[in-house]
Amino acid sequence: MLEYSFSKPNSSRSPSLVTEDLRSFISKIYTVYSTNSASFMGLSSIGTASDGMQLCIFDLRRGQHEGQELDKILYFFPADLPFSTQLSVIGLSEGLITFTRIFSPEAACEVIEAERHSHVFYEAEPDIWMVMIVEKSKDSEAIWRIDALREVLKEIHSLFVMFHGSIRALLEREPGGGLTRAHLYPFIMDYLRACQKRSPLDKCCCGNAEVAVSDGLIWIYFLVGKKLQLPSFRDCLMERRSVQMLTVGREAAIEVQTLVRILESSAGNLPCFSLILFQDLLVSTTLSPEDTINLYKYAVLRLTPLALSSGAKSWSYLRKGNSSSHVSIGSTLLSTGSVSEQFYGSHDASPAGDNRYHVTRPLQHDKWFKGKDGFLITDIWGGDIGSLNVTTPTVWLHQTEERMYLCAYQYKSLTIILLIPLSSILNGDQGVSILKQQLLENASLKILKVEEKLSKGWGGENAYHVSGYRYLLVDGNRDISRASPPTKVTTLSKESLLALNRLREEVDAEKSRAKWDNPGREKDLEVCIRAKNNAWAVARITGGKELYMVLEKANETLLYASDAVEKFSNRYCSGTFSLD
């Protein structure tokens, strides 16, 4: 059994003939590999789906000559697999990519579905590929959407570029590849250790996952030891590459706009951008959609009050004693005895074992702290946090294609991120300190007022709960999403979530087909699925906006469920998803 998907067929032959040729060819590849390898891609000896997963990054332009094959490997998880196995995985992936380009030279292969494995492809940069290979399992908990897995790959790459620049630029800077590997390995491992917050009632498919309880929330880590917890069907009412926005009234919106103007004027003639969050919700942004998504993700992971409180540390706590005993420098010189042994066993040949490169690790946990002046500080980019002599963080913006200083200020539930070009500040960290002082002098009172306004209008963690509905709204035109609170989603039965996951897979397939048939045109779509427990899963897609919903008390008829969706659309979506 084999299925494939890529963006746009480019062949004069009928699609059925193309499909049969592709099925036949790739089936032969699989037959050869499975027959001649006692442990196909190193996965046959692994018993569970969370273990039976591999993630690799490779460059098709490298390692094309005999004896240089290892040069193309930029990252591989798990790294303690023999290099022969890693090369087998990458060799097969490269063969599949090369062959599918015969049928679609201008569009990349997205997924290959085999009987025992799913191969998820993402061409992050020209000829630089990220591939996730997941072993299929009969375990009902090990069910995921392919598009959700691809979003993980996209997010890894987008965040990496924001902090370190493009992979190709690193390779051009140091053609040997050591610099690139030294950055990729710790960054991705830190990302996999990054966590998502869930309600304490969420049973999700943790299996043996490591969990931490903080402030009534359970934090579930993607990576526990060498086991990777993949996004599962229980995450089908969330959209990864999107931001969640706070709904504000007219008066509050005016106050926020005034604050944004004050922030810009505080920078004088310097160009600057800002991002404002309340709790974990976006309030305002002057960034491009791509940069907004990346900065928002990083803020929720590491900068917001909830992210900081999970570390249970503060600047005043660090000042009580010798700061060096509490905090280690975030910018580390990687050594075989640290990252390599801790993450990958004693793999002496691990690229992370090269100690020639000074590597910044921006996704490290518990490395941001709130200073007495309200600005957030970190030693990740270098310095001593105890003496406040730290290097200002920097990020690379997609919008301006230049590196920016990142200044984060926090007052109660309000987090403000200000971005200023490095080229605009001549005195470096000293100039940034002066800018921070100007910001406090000009904007303190307005920040106070905005936080007060937003707090009064805030309805709490269940502010966007709609009784009787469990929903996800996605505005693809603005990369915004809103969903039922996690505590409410956990009340859904497993059967309901499985039905919604299957429905989203069908919608993903329809959207992919629509790209082939009508490039550039959005397709209106409605899909309804009846679950085993008689719940209804409904999807409506129109004009780049998507609504997904589970109705467990929608009676026996589709008409009743459709009427419930109409009422929701008219009341909360201005009739966007109404059929009238």
Image (spheres, rainbow, N blue to C red):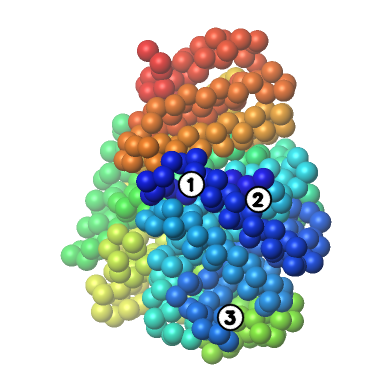
Q: Is residue 484 above or below residue 242?
A: above
Which of the pair 241/517 is nearer the observer? 517
Give the residue pinned by disc 1: 18
Local crowd size for mark 1, using a 10 Å CA cut-off: few (<14), some (14–19), many (≥20): some
Q: Is residue 331 above or below residue 284?
A: below
Q: Is residue 27 above or below residue 14?
A: below
- Residue depicted at x 29% and y 80%: 427
In the rendered structure, the answer to whether residue 331 lies left or right of residue 475 reads right
Sooner in the amino-acid sequence: mark 1 or mark 3? 1
Measured Cα–Cα span from mark 2 to mark 1:
17 Å
**Position in image of residue 275 (x %, y %):** 37, 53
Give the residue pinned by disc 2: 114
Amino acid beneath label 2: Ala
Q: Is label 3 in a helix, a strand or a loop?
A: helix
- Residue depicted at x 46% and y 15%: 566
Residue mark closest to the camera, 2 vs 1: 1
Give the residue pinned by disc 3: 70
Measured Cα–Cα span from mark 1 to mark 3:
33 Å
**Position in image of residue 433 (x %, y %):** 35, 72
- Residue depicted at x 65% and y 50%: 114
